[in-house]
Image (spheres, rainbow, N blue to C red):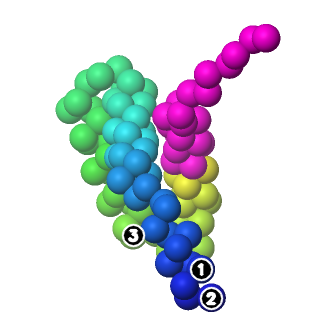
Amino acid sequence: MPAVLIGVLRDVDFGHHLESLAITFTVSVVQTLLVFGLRVDSWMHETANFLRHYESASDVARIPINLVLAIGFALNLLIVVIARRPKQVLING
């Protein structure tokens, strides 16, 4: 079983996946900047305010926030992965 797993992992292009994650993170940051109208000072203030409240919240209170952030990141990742997939050449006839 471990030999099969190693063979499967050898064929995975981790660099491509790491690039997709980096692009997704950048897209997420740019989206939050666009929400605040590209006002970086407002964005930094609200991000610090969010982190202060998030840190002081109980674990149960963090669950909905974690779900929203995870779903948003997953949707961004899905879009990036679909956009970066290899293009297939369609041959007619």
Label 2's element? loop
Residue range (magenta): 73-93
Disc number placed over residue 50 in the picture, else none: none
The residue drawn where x is 50% and y is 78% is: 6
The residue drawn where x is 28% and y is 50% is: 48
Label 1's element? helix
Mark 3: give few (<14), some (14-19) or many (20+) Cα within 10 Å: few
Query: Residue placed farthest to the left in the image?
Result: 41
Q: Amino acid at mark 3?
A: Ser
Q: Earlier in the sequence, mark 3 or mark 1?
A: 1
Query: Residue placed farthest to the top in the image?
Result: 93
Residue 78 visible in the picture: yes
Q: Amino acid at mark 1?
A: Val
Quadrant containing the C terminus is top right
Residue 52 lies, in percent from the top left, at 32, 60
Q: Which residue is mark 3?
A: 56
Mark 1: give few (<14), some (14-19) or many (20+) Cα within 10 Å: few
Spatial CA span between label 1 and label 2: 5 Å
Above or below — where is 72 with respect to 9? above
Q: Which residue is mark 2?
A: 1
The residue drawn where x is 24% and y is 40% is: 44
Label 3's element? helix
Left of 19 or right of it: where is 93?
A: right
| Residue depth check, mark 3 versus mark 1: number of the one nearer the observer | 1
Q: Amino acid at mark 2?
A: Met
Q: Which residue is mark 1?
A: 4
